[in-house]
Amino acid sequence: MKLIRVTYTKWYNILKDGLSKENPIAIAVLGICSALAVSNRVENALAMGLGVTFVIIASSLTVSMIRNFIPSRVRMITYMVIISTFVILVQQFLQAYFPSIAAALGAYVGLIITNCIVMGRSEAYASKNPVRYSILDGLANGLGYTYVLVVVAVIRELLAFGTILNVQVLPDTFERWVSMAMAPGGFFVLGILIWIIRELTHNYEVQES
């Protein structure tokens, strides 16, 4: 019974870290470029978030499975090859089934390869932990990335276009905020959201004297 309780506690802590306490965007401040570039519409944010989540889970699973066989000298290039393989799968899937979204995301899908969140989870967690925990860690960080992206996208799309998922929400008389369709608007919304999340999680930068 005690072992089960300890296991559930560890799983809960992994989920909590990825979603809030160590959120990859709000706390670790990683993946900011893609967050600003693709969060002007909800459908783009969802596609990018789910794509990144899949790549993190799949690459963390693979790295964890073969971690004892990867020579230390070539571990980074090994991670890159593994991550690249899954990014190509995501890219091909979007181009085959969602060509409009693939076109809107453009090069940013391919740039998942260089996303620090994906590489960071492989190096910092999957290379040192069992498969089951690595999968959960990948899921938590992927969802943590996704929900921040989607929240930003909801605000930006609503104010910039008056729609959510291309469904008209605000009347035509509503004055559109053109800045929200551009990266500066995304930076502004993301900054406020990061501040809110850090306030709720009591995660503050400590200034050294």
Image (cartoon, rainbow, N blue to C red):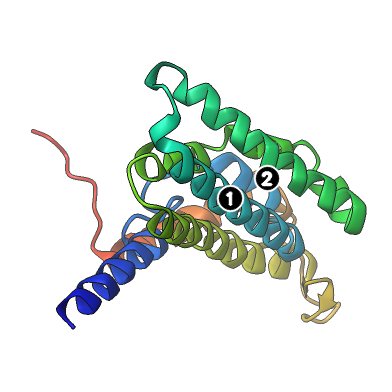
Task: Give the residue pinned by disc 1.
Answer: 58
The vertical placement of 183 against 161, above or below, is above
Element class at badge 1: helix
Residue type, label 2: Ala
**Measuring 51% from the left and 50% from the top, which residue is drawn there?**
61
- Foreground of the two, 108 or 95: 95
Task: Give the residue pinned by disc 2.
Answer: 37
Q: Position of residue 106 (x, y in %)?
A: 81, 41
Residue 160: quarter of image = bottom right
Neighbour tally class for label 2: few under 14, some 14-19, many 20 plus, Cα within 10 Å? some
Mark-to-mark CA distance, 2 and 1: 24 Å
Neighbour tally class for label 1: few under 14, some 14-19, many 20 plus, Cα within 10 Å? many
- Which of the two discs, 2 and 1, sits closer to the camera? 1
Element class at badge 2: helix
Residue type, label 1: Ala
**Measuring 72% from the left and 36% from the top, which residue is drawn there?**
110
The vertical placement of 136 against 85, above or below, is below
